[in-house]
Amino acid sequence: RPGTRAYREHGATVDPVLRDVYTRRLMKYQERQKQISLQKNTEMVGNVFEVLTDGISHKDSNKYTGRTATGKVVNFDFAETGDILTGKYTMVKITRAHPTHLTGKEER
């Protein structure tokens, strides 16, 4: 990347063989991290957590999104009444785990 020390020292002409090695190592590391994250998130399924609501999910307008006290992202279904407000806490039961986030349902 331009502006980095490596770029200043080696320029844009990094050996393609080395770039392939670096890319494979990074992909292997990222895949392992996904496995670890999914394993840890799976342990949370079935539990109820207090979630600070960020607002309606950008990907699904039928869900809210928020974060647990430990910063885990949770996308969750909300009650028909729609009385959840951004910046408020709500209790959410985790129903599904993903490597990058959790899915849940508001507990009433």
Image: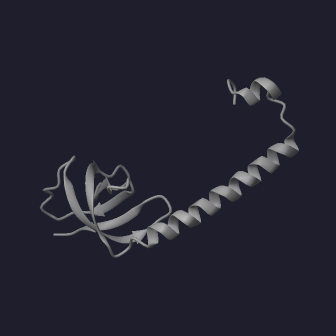
Q: In x, y percent, where is residue 94?
A: 33, 69
Colour scheme in use: one colour
Where on the picture, by quarter, is residue 51?
bottom left
Where on the picture, by quarter, is residue 41?
bottom left
Would residue 68 be found to the left or right of residue 88 on screen? right
Which residue does the image show at 39% across and 70% down from the upper left?
44
Q: In this view, which residue lies farthest toward the bottom?
A: 46
Above or below, comparing residue 92 to residue 1 in the picture:
below
The quadrant in which the C terminus is found is: bottom left
**Numbered circles on residues, count:** 0
The quadrant in which the N terminus is found is: top right
Q: In x, y percent, where is residue 90?
A: 20, 59
Which residue does the image show at 84% across and 44% down from the upper left?
18
Q: In this view, which residue lies farthest toward the front?
A: 70
Say which of 93 and 75 sits in front. 93
Say which of 22 and 56 sits in front. 22
Which residue does the image show at 75% across and 49% down from the upper left?
23
Q: In x, y percent, where is residue 7?
A: 75, 27
Would residue 84 be found to the left or right of residue 101 on screen? left
Which residue does the image show at 48% across and 58% down from the upper left?
100
Q: In x, y percent, where is residue 16?
A: 85, 41
